[in-house]
Image (tube, grey):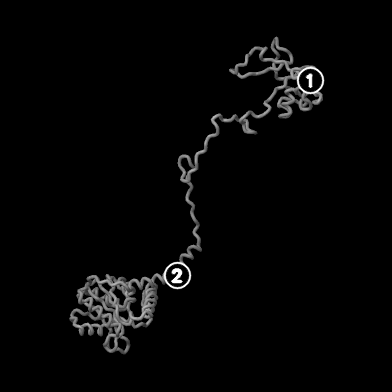
C-alpha cells in the first residue's frame, strides 16, 4: 500500500511476471533506439545506488518543490517522512518501495526562461525594414496629417496684406508713370486741367504739347480734349485745349472737344460715350506721369483699350517734392476709386 495521501501507484497496472518489485519503469519514445525488453526497461532504485550523493527525488523537490504526483506525505518528507538531514531510505510507511518520477531540473540550453517552446534552429525571423511610404516590407502608409486652421495665422496674413498694399500700390503708380506707350490707336485723349479765361495752365499746356507730338508721329488721326468748367468760368477745359491745338496748326476737324467733366471719372465717362458713338475702341491717354495709372484703370473699366503716354515737362515733374506728393496723392485716389468707385474730392491742379 502506498503511504497515506500518496496515490501515485493507484493507477499503475499490475506488474508483469518477472518484473522486480520496487523497480522504476522507464518509458521511451517510439523510434528513440531504447530496447523494449523488461530488463532494459526496469532499474532498481535505492539509496545504495547513489553513495555519497543525494537522491534524485531530493534534487527534483529542491528545484521545483513538490511534484505533481506527490501527496501530503511527500510534501512533508521526501522519503516516507524521514528526516531530510538524516538521509531517509526511499521506502514507504508500509515497507514497500515507491517510484518517484524525475522531472527536468532546469531549462534546456537555448530556451528563454519562463517559456516551454524549443528555440528555432534557424534563429529569429528577421524583421522587415520600415518604409515611410508603406508597401511591401513596410508598414501601411500613414494618412497625411491635417493641420488645424489657426485663426492667428489668418489674422497675421490679413494684417500683412493690409500693411503691404499701400507701398505696393505706390510702387505701381511710380512704375506706370515711367512707361511711355505709343501704339496705333483710334484717338489721343488729353485730360483737362486748369485754364485761365481760355488759356491753358502750364500743366495743361504741357499735356497738349505732348499730345500734338503724338499726333504728328501718326499715333492716332484724332485728338480729343476733355474737361468742363468751374462755377463762374466762361471757358471750359475741353474748349480751351481745342483752341490751343488749332492755334498750333492742327486741323480743326481732327480735334474733338468734350466740354464736360469735373474730375477724372466724369471726364472718362463722357469720353466713353463719344467713343461708343463713333465706334472707337482704342485710346492713348495723355496726362501727368503720376496720373497715368488711375486714368488707365478708369478707361479700361469703361470698355476702352487704353495705353498711357504721359508728358515729361511742366511743373508736375520738375521738383522732386512735387513728384512725391503726386505719387502719394494718386495712390490714395486709386484706392478710393477701387473701394468706392468714385473720384476723390482732393483739389490738385494736376487732376
> For this rendering, which residue is in front, 124 or 318?
318
Q: Is residue 278 left or right of residue 331?
A: left
Give residue 309's position: percent from left, percent from top: 28, 74
Quadrant occupied by the N terminus: top right
Residue at x 18%, y 80% (from the top left corner): 253
Mark 2 to mark 1 CA distance (whole Å):
104 Å
166 sits left or right of 39 in the view: left
Residue at 72% x, 15% y: name it. 44
| Callout 1 secondary element | loop
Tell me: residue 114, above or below residue 318. Answer: above
Residue located at (73% from left, 19% from top): 99
Q: Residues within 10 Å of mark 1 (few under 14, many from 20)?
A: some
Q: Quadrant of the C terminus?
A: bottom left
Q: Nearer the viewer, residue 317 or 256?
A: 317
Which label's residue is closer to the chain start, 2 or 1? 1
Disc ID at residue 179: none
Q: Which residue is mark 1?
A: 89
Residue 16 visible in this rendered orientation of the protein:
yes
Instruction: Say what secondary structure mark 2 lies in.
Output: helix
Q: What's the mark number on residue 163?
A: 2
Residue lying furthest top in this view?
Answer: 18
Q: Are marks 2 and 1 in contact (CB under 8 Å)?
A: no
Q: Position of residue 193 (x, y in %)?
A: 30, 82
Amino acid at each position: 500500500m502506498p503511504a497515506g495521501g500518496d496515490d501515485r501507484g493507484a493507477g499503475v497496472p499490475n506488474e508483469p511476471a518477472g518484473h522486480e518489485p520496487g523497480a522504476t519503469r522507464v518509458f521511451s519514445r517510439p523510434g528513440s533506439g531504447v530496447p523494449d525488453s523488461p530488463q532494459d526497461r526496469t532499474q532498481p532504485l535505492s539509496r545504495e545506488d547513489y553513495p555519497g550523493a543525494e537522491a534524485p527525488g531530493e534534487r527534483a523537490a529542491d528545484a521545483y518543490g513538490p511534484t505533481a504526483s506527490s501527496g501530503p506525505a511527500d510534501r512533508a518528507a521526501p522519503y516516507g517522512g524521514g528526516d531530510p538531514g538524516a538521509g531517509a531510505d526511499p521506502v514507504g510507511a508500509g515497507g514497500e518501495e515507491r517510484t518517484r518520477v524525475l522531472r527536468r531540473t532546469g531549462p534546456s540550453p537555448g530556451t528563454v526562461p519562463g517559456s516551454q517552446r524549443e528555440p528555432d534552429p534557424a534563429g529569429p525571423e528577421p524583421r522587415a525594414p520600415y518604409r515611410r511610404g508603406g508597401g511591401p516590407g513596410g508598414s501601411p502608409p500613414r494618412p497625411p496629417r491635417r493641420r488645424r486652421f489657426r485663426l492667428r495665422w489668418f489674422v497675421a496674413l490679413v494684417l500683412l496684406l493690409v500693411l503691404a498694399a499701400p507701398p505696393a500700390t505706390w510702387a505701381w503708380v511710380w512704375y506706370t508713370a515711367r512707361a511711355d506707350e505709343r501704339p496705333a490707336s483710334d484717338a489721343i485723349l488729353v485730360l483737362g486741367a486748369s485754364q485761365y479765361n481760355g488759356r491753358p495752365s502750364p500743366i495743361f499746356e504741357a499735356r497738349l504739347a505732348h499730345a500734338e507730338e503724338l499726333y504728328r508721329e501718326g499715333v492716332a488721326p484724332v485728338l480729343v480734349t476733355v474737361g468742363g468748367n468751374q462755377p463762374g468760368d466762361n471757358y471750359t477745359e475741353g474748349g480751351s485745349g481745342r483752341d490751343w491745338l488749332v492755334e498750333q496748326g492742327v486741323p480743326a476737324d481732327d480735334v474733338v472737344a468734350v466740354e464736360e467733366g469735373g474730375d477724372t471719372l466724369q471726364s472718362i465717362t463722357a469720353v466713353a460715350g463719344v467713343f461708343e458713338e463713333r465706334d472707337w475702341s482704342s485710346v492713348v491717354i495723355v496726362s501727368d506721369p503720376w496720373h497715368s495709372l488711375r486714368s488707365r484703370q478708369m478707361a479700361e473699366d469703361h470698355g476702352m483699350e487704353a495705353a498711357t503716354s504721359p508728358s515729361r515737362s511742366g511743373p508736375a515733374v520738375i521738383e522732386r517734392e512735387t513728384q512725391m506728393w503726386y505719387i502719394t496723392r494718386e495712390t490714395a485716389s486709386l484706392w478710393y476709386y477701387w473701394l468706392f468707385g468714385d473720384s476723390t474730392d482732393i483739389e490738385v491742379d494736376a487732376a
